Image: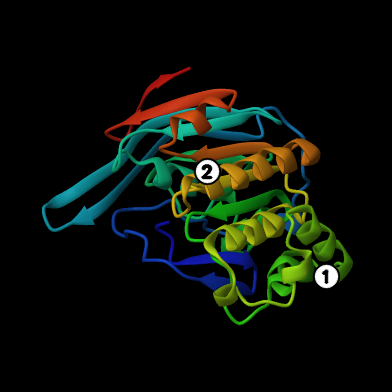
Amino acid sequence: MPYAALRLSPSTRMTGGSSAPTGGATNQPNHNTTISRRRMVHTTPLVRAEALAKAVASPGGRLTILDDISLAVAPGEAVAIVGTSGSGKSTLLGLLAGLDAPTHGRVWLGGIALDELDEDGRAELRARLVGFVFQSFHLLPTLTALENVMLPLELRGEEARATARELLARVGLEARASHYPAQLSGGEQQRVALARAFVVRPKVLFADEPTGNLDERTGARVIELMFALREEAGCTLILVTHDAALAARCDRRVSLEAGRIAGQS
């Protein structure tokens, strides 16, 4: 996952992973609009990108990572983004989720244009609509499994403990509620991450190689849980994967090649 910090709320960051590439112009808001000042409008599609491009500075000159990406994802749809390493899959996921800004083009999430929001507004929109599951889990090491799952609800000022316990039980980890991430296996950590993602009943789940650090058997269990929880929540799923079998379970596959959409099926 290429993002240095996942902004959970307007005042909170969760750090981890390596830094995102920087350089080149980005779309920056020139006003301080926040999502609390805007009316949420139910639209179809739930996630939409128009003519997205992402370029960064590199020692060899300007490097184009994505170019002319247009994509629409309907409410309830499951979309797999596939392609070889370096094709821009994770970069596209980050742009669609509002974790990074495109060099050109626009993204709408829940009917809201992300470039019309400041950083706090984008963080608030994600807190309301989005769940995340990453390859490297991104659990906070100083919090127990229960506290990690509680965190998104606490940031929204909602009663958290009972709901978090229910989600941990749903993923088979109620007995591990008081354990810290270092005391859990990789599969258990990813199941905690799933519980945390779904505790807010997101409208859309973004998953970046959710089984990439897991063995085949553990990964299969995590995927079954992810699809079961998604069905219960009725949420949209957008995932990046190298796993052909996982991609085949989705409603649609978007293939990237050298930063452009090469096909959809």
Amino acid marked by disc 2: Leu
Is residue 63 toward the left or the right of residue 32 in the image? left
Q: Is residue 97 visible?
A: no
The residue closer to the viewer here, 188 or 29, is 188
Q: Which mark is residue 96?
A: 2
Residue 187 seen in the current view: yes
Residue 63 rendering spot, x and y as whole percentages: 21, 47
> What residue lies at 76% left-to-right and 61% top-to-bottom?
168
Name the image quarter holding residue 175. Answer: bottom right
Quarter of the picture containing the N terminus is: bottom left
Residue 198 lies, in percent from the top left, at: 73, 52
157 vs 239: above or below = below
Residue at the spot 42% in from the left edge and 46% down from the top edge: 90
- Residue 58 lies, in percent from the top left, at 18, 56
Residue position marked by numbered label 1 in the rendering = 157
Q: Nearer the viewer, residue 15 or 67?
A: 15
Name the residue at 67% across, 76% down.
179
